Image: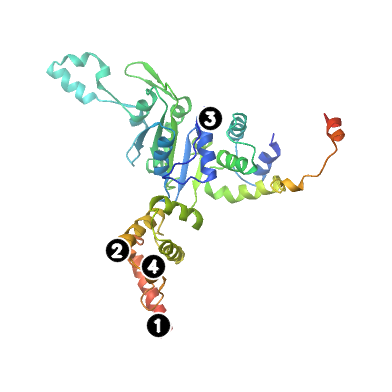
Amino acid sequence: MFVNFFHELKAHNVPVSLREYLSLLEALDNDVIGNQVEDFYYLSKAALVKDERNLDKFDRVFGEVFKGLESLGEGDIAEIPEEWLRSMT
Amino acid sequence: MSQKFEGTENYIATEDLRVAVNAALTLQRPLLIKGEPGTGKTVLAEEVSKALDMELITWHVKSTTKAQQGLYEYDAITRLRDSQLGDERVKDVKNYINKGKLWEAFEKKKRVVLLIDEIDKADIEFPNDLLQELDRMEFYVYETGETIKAVERPLVIITSNNEKELPDAFLRRCFFHYISFPDADTMNQIINVHYPDIKDRLVRNALASFYEVREVPGLKKKPSTSELLDWLKLLMNEDIDPETLREQDAGKLIPPLHGALIKNEQDVHLFERLAFLARRERN
């Protein structure tokens, strides 16, 4: 889960460690936040960034990795035939 | 842990702060708070303890504070004196162990908030010395041979003013929140909480000049939230007419009662110079 995100942070010189990444997953596992993208952004920021100088870098990487996530508004969801979904399970 | 922190009526918590507090609360890790002086770092711990109905234990760190003092101190001098006086208490070493704040927090039956205030004041080894204790929430007392273990792991809140860098190993174990300077909207909410009946116009004009003051280049100490609140209190007491705040006439560049906003002699001089220049341009 989110391994790509973790590697992107590393590649952009945000000092993240495995330990911090695991605590992020632990927090998700414990339902610290609901299902909103904003909350996930706040949580990953609190867990992974420990220096305010890295906040900008983090924001950039987050924006790149999760591009388009927040634009999934109610009206944008296309009508998908039920058979299609069933065939995926 | 079903408790969640949602902010209180006296404290405006932004969404990201709420998430950070709840993460620390659920995973029982320390929460490190940084931010400009006066943005409410210490107040946060007080409000969290109030909102969650947990007792607050504060440990103020100074430049001379040692990590050991938070655990316990062995008072050898009193013991030596007692032994010379033939006091009975001298036989039990326990009588000479003074409990520190960490010990105090560990032995509480109910979960508490432990605030380690201004951790960056102490020397660089201080956070490292506390790593094990905060991680496992236990420590060993050599003099008596007992291990003190937390009954209920306290919620540890640590504040730092960024005077020193904190060691990486320490940072990795914490959740981190940076209190950024509140924007005009949040500032309005904060003022409403503290002075609900303040005149609307006064607030708007005061805020405008407040942010103007913050933007003056070369200020040694920019005014922060707590100074703004003090200043508003003064303006209310003096019943200053909102319009005088707007006036940008000659010599009025310095806001009224500026002593509450600008605390530095050089900054006041800077302002007077700017006011002088503004007057000259107009003439």
Question: Would you place residue B138 above or below residue A32 in this image?
Answer: above
Specify which label sits upstream in the sequence, 1 or 2. Answer: 2
- The kind of residue tagged 1 is Arg
Which element carries disc 3, helix, strand or loop? helix
* Residues at discs 3 and 2 in contact (Cβ within 8 Å): no
Judging depth in this view, the residue of B126 and B104 nearest the camera is B104
Which element carries disc 2, helix, strand or loop? helix
Question: Would you place residue B6 above or below residue B236 in this image?
Answer: above
Specify which label sits upstream in the sequence, 3 or 1. Answer: 3
- The kind of residue tagged 4 is Pro
Given the image, what chain letter belongs to the residue carrying mark 2? B
- The kind of residue tagged 2 is Glu
Query: Does label 2 lie on the same chain as label 4?
Result: yes
- Residue B181 visible in the snapshot: no
Q: Position of residue B25 (x, y in %)?
A: 50, 32
Left-right relation of B260 to B173: left
Q: Nearer the viewer, mark 1 or mark 2?
A: 2
Which element carries disc 4, helix, strand or loop? helix
Judging depth in this view, the residue of B76 and B249 nearest the camera is B249
Residue marked by disc 4: B242
Q: Tell me where residue B152 sits by quadrant.
A: top left
* Residues at discs 4 and 2 in contact (Cβ within 8 Å): no
Residue marked by disc 1: B280
Residue marked by disc 3: B27
Gap in angstroms between the C-alphas marked 1 and 4? 26 Å
Residue at 25% x, 21% y is B96
Q: Tell me where residue B58 sits by quadrant.
A: top left
Q: Position of residue B124 (x, y in %)?
A: 42, 40
